[in-house]
Amino acid sequence: MSIKLTEEQQMIQSMVRDFAREMIAPTAMQRDLTKEFPAENLRRLGELGLMGMMIPPQYGGAGADTISYVLALSEIAYACASTAVVMSVQNSIVCESILRYGNEDQKQRFLVPLSSGQEIGAFALTEPNAGSDPVRQAAKAVRDGDTYILNGTKRFITTGKNANTIIVTAKTDASMRHKGISAFLVKKDNPGLKVGNLENKMGLCASDTTDLIFEDCRVPVNDRLAEEGQGFTIAMTGLDGGRIGIAAQSVGVAQAAMDAAVTYAKEREQFGQAISKFQGIRWMIADMATEIEAARQLMYSAAAMKDRNENYTKQASMAKLFASEMVNRVTAQALQMHGGYGFTKEYPVERFYRDARVFTIYEGTSEIQRVVISNHILKDKRGP
Ligand code: CAA
């Protein structure tokens, strides 16, 4: 068996599992069809302390460890991956970045409403021409007295439309490479911020993904996160935690797909018996279960290293790489086991298959995870 969960971790897992399967799963397919943002789900997650899980109670959070967080996030992803991605971005790359880099005043003004679940956050790093290579971003922040003036377009921003607070990065010094990038906390009602194009996606349909357009957007100097030039480090550190979250989403969706496939295989009869009696199906089930377990262990090990305050960058990338590739194989197999029914919206497996597709792309593609892992092993970086 794997790591031994503490009593508290088991309680959190079982509480979130019951909640997710009773309250979130039954309407997930409907939300996928209507693309309705899961506002009510998120409000309830906030009430349960799941929107700032790893944030200390003094800043509105639940003070839980990362293992508890991945257990909870996997359970939410099992029920609805669109809800899970909002929870994931909120907990790690938004809340933890403010906890790690914000000053006391920023924690009170921005972090408390986020981690207590009253507000939702987004992280705006990616641009139309800067995805895997965020150092080449074009957004600029020019200092003007007590404010910065931000101009630029951010793309593929998870919860860009529905978030209340956005952490945005921009160049404060174009002559410097990554050290010329700074991060800012921007409220959605800032008149210089517009929500642009809403992406029409193949999966995670109930979570909005948008452009965010900054046009002479004035941000007080007091709302700069950390010092000038620290924006890239803030993003990279946040993404380390975020990538463990993508592993957790992958494990949750894969488990849901496998459970659905096993149920179907026991019920579906062909050639006079349940298809679960056939070796071809049994081997698929065995492979799926083994792959999910391997991903779960990588997820646990990255989370445990983070909880021990060790450098976990490589382990987070390994967990994200393996788990996101795994869920694409597992959901494809689960769909195959459903035969023609798997291709219809009568069964949830086609949604799992579509939702999982982006996991090898967002928060760093599989190719970028391999760059990070090999850089750490070789320690003589050749560049991406
Ligand atoms: N933690 C802390 N610091 C880090 C770091 C980490 N994990 N990784 C790099 N750094 C530091 C380096 O130490 C270096 O600092 P110094 O010069 O002071 O030593 C600095 O950052 C620059 O590092 P590199 O030269 O290695 O940077 P690079 O330009 O070669 O890029 C990269 C490295 C790994 C490819 C990085 O660009 C990367 O991760 N790219 C992918 C971006 C990404 O994941 N985007 C996802 C968008 S967000 C999203 O999807 C959220 C959502 O809405 C769901």
Image (cartoon, rainbow, N blue to C red):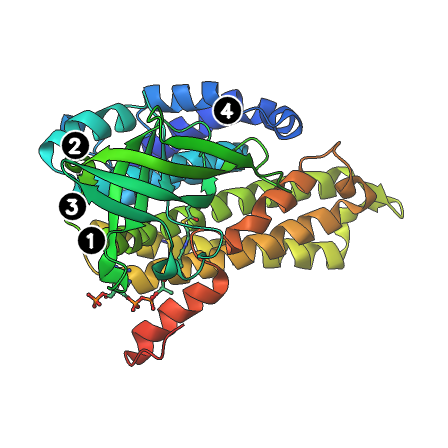
At label 3, counting other C-alpha atoms closer than 10 Å, the crowd grade (few under 14, some 14-19, many 20 or more) is: some
Q: Which residue is mark 1?
A: 230
Ligand 1 quadrant in view: bottom left
Q: Label 1 sits on what residue type?
A: Gln
Q: Which of labels 2 and 4 is toward the front? A: 2
| Number of marks | 4
> Is residue 379 among the parts visible in the rendering?
yes
Q: Which residue is mark 3?
A: 226
Q: Which residue is mark 4?
A: 38
| CA separation in Å, label 2 and label 1 | 16 Å
Q: Which of labels 1 and 4 is toward the front? A: 1
> Is residue 61 among the parts visible in the rendering?
no
The location of residue 207, given as percent across then percent down, is 52, 33
Q: Nearer the viewer, residue 46 or 258?
A: 46
Q: Nearer the viewer, residue 32 or 188?
A: 188
| CA separation in Å, label 3 and label 1 | 7 Å
Q: Are marks 3 and 1 in contact (CB under 8 Å)?
A: yes
